[in-house]
Image (cartoon, grey):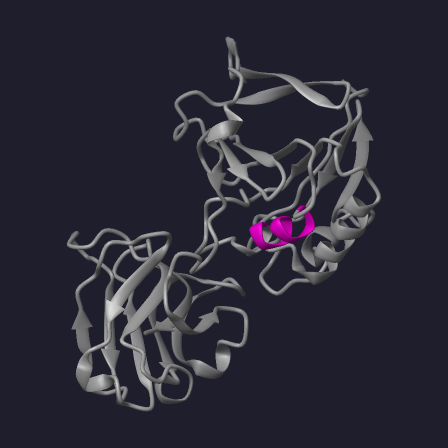
Amino acid sequence: NPDIAAKLTLGNHDTYPYEKNAGLFHQVFKEYPTYSSFDLAGAHIVLLCGGQSGDLGEIQTAWLQEDIDKIPATQTVIFFVHQPPFGHVVRERGISESIRKVFASHEGAMWAICGHKHHNSTKVFQLPRTTVVQDIMISCNPKKVKKPGYWVYGLKDGQVQTRIYREAGSGFRVAKPLDHSKARPIPIPFGNTPNKLWTLFIGNGDREYLVKAKAGDVEYWWAYIREIVYKLPLGQKGKGAATLAMLADLGTAGAENSNQVLLSSSGEDWQLQALPAQRDGVYRFSIPESMRTAQDLYVKILGKNATCYLGGFALCQ
């Protein structure tokens, strides 16, 4: 239908790591805006660019802040972004940080409509003064999705009045009303990690501590790690630390071809660590007593399978 405008939201399949302002995309679609906004049926619609790493960046975040400052704090905001902003703290965590900052004082209803994941999911998250519904939808990859399709949103008087899921081929269902009283807290990287002395996030000054990397560089996290080594300043930044916290996805402990974590005070004599359970995106390792007084703590990750991602470190008491 030519009367229905097609709008694009750029993500990791449209951009490269470290790329600014969607340079790859604009080689083909030269005039298309990287991000934009407009009003529709009383709601404010925002189209964001999640980039390669799931991060809005300083320039886009500043634009978003200026854009939202122009609308009433009670207006409904529906933003589209490729990567789901809430739930991940290891990968694609930068979108959440920008949204939490920009909408800290917003009071109107909010919706985040996303793709990226190969499943459908609806969850409600809590912001300081409102809630935000995150809808993840996928209309492709039918081999991985039992019931592929798409959502139709009904807007009236600035509110989402109905949501209808149209299944591919035939059939549809009307979504039930959501219970906003059970909104989830938005996960924050290392947000529930106690007694932090020093934190280091990938993409924020980490390269001076990097010794070796055989992994995919996604700017704000490492992906598909085969081997990576960091030299953390235990004596200078983490004096008195007894625990190493790692913001990572390392798969299931004890599984065949499990990923491995090793520690050393010299970078030569490595001690293999038992992989603990992941909680809130964090693995907590007890630093061996023989290493706690060392100047440096070397951390090595050996990736034995595809589920091996790193977002940062924290040295804790």
Q: Quadrant of residue 107?
A: top right
The quarter of the image holding the N terminus is: top right
Q: Quadrant of residue 315?
A: bottom left
Can the viewer see residue 170? no
The quarter of the image holding the C terminus is: bottom left
Looking at the rendered structure, the number of numbered marks drawn on it comes to 0
Q: Position of residue 211 (x, y in %)?
A: 39, 82
Q: Is residue 269 above or below residue 203?
A: below
Q: Is residue 7 above or below residue 280?
A: above
In magenta, the rendered stretch is 96-103
Report the magenta stretch's main SS: helix
Q: Is residue 145 left or right of residue 270?
A: right
Q: Going by the picture, which residue comes out furthest to the top?
A: 171
Residue 261 part of the magenta-drawn span: no
Residue at x 51%, y 17% (from the top left corner): 168
- As rendered, which of 274 and 149 lies closer to the eye? 274
Q: Position of residue 282 (x, y in %)?
A: 35, 58
Q: Is residue 272 left or right of residue 5?
A: left
Q: Position of residue 185 (x, y in %)?
A: 48, 43
- As rendered, which of 291 and 219 lies closer to the eye? 291
Residue at x 80%, y 21% (from the top left corner): 2
Can the viewer see residue 282? yes
